[in-house]
Image (tube, helix red, strand yellow):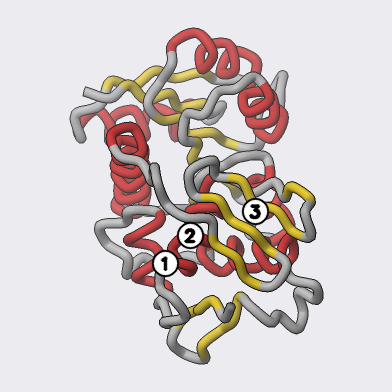
Amino acid sequence: MPRLLVIEDNVDLAFGLKTVLEFEGHQVAVAEDGETGLERAQESDPALIILDLMLPRKGGYEVLRELRQGGVRTPVLILTARSQESDLVMGFNLGADDYVTKPFSTAELVARVRALLRRSSLQATTGTEGEKVERFGQVEVDPDTRMVRRNGEVVELTPKEFDLLLALIRRRGAVASRNELLKEVWRYGNADIMTRTVDVHIAELRRKLEEDPAEPRHILTARKAGYRLQP
């Protein structure tokens, strides 16, 4: 029975989330401000954190930054009323694993929670030990150490950015649809949920790894089909 932590200052929303997730079989703790949420996340070692970005005492971005800087690798699903790509990118850069934009449906939230928990469980029981270092252009990717270098310099990728990159590499140039990537990288049971998660992560990979992100040479869009990696 995974322990979940909801950090949300809206009492009604927090109660609703707690009720839905407990119905799903989870133990759920609630913190109503960022400072309390950070303390509980550090002390109780939850399996998943659901984090609102707009919080009193300590904002969601700050909570996320301090968690990751403190070495906490617990999956984090952020709740945001913001849909600007720059806000989502900031959350992902700080180490968020996924997001839901308010207002959201109960089915969507539950699907994403399930996907993150499945992904976390798989990472704990399987590995990529023994895989060879992959290269494309000036980029070098080591699956064993999860290190990426461009022109010899280390490039910091978030866990999901690395998983997405690896999913493209392993297809050896074949096209991956958004639905396939959602199922493989985010473990969505229902990948038909509308989401910009893949697109936002692809944009970040291009920004970090392409010489000209606006005219990518390696991480390519297959029109109306998905994405592929061109060595």
1 and 2 marks in contact (CB < 8 Å): yes
How far apart are the alpha carbons under marks 3 and 1?
Answer: 26 Å
Which of the two residues, 60 or 55, is positioned nearer the viewer here?
A: 60
Disc with the residue nearer the chain's start (3 vs 1): 3
Horizontal side of 12 relative to 137 (left or right) equals left
How far apart are the alpha carbons under marks 3 and 2?
Answer: 21 Å
Instruction: Return the residue at label 3.
Output: 88
Look at discs 3 and 1 and give the one toward the viewer: 1
Residue 145, image x, y percentages: 54, 40
Instruction: Return the residue at label 1.
Output: 170
Residue 219, image x, y percentages: 61, 75
Horizontal side of 33 relative to 184 (left or right) equals right
Q: Residue at x 68, y 54 (%)?
A: 89
Instruction: Return the residue at label 2.
Output: 166
Q: Residue at x 52, y 91 (%)?
A: 223
Q: Which image quadrant: the C terminus?
A: bottom right
Q: Is residue 193 above or below residue 160?
A: below
Label 3: which secondary element: helix
Residue neighbourhood size for the residue with mark 2, other residues' Cα within 10 Å, grouped as few (<14), some (14–19), many (≥20): some
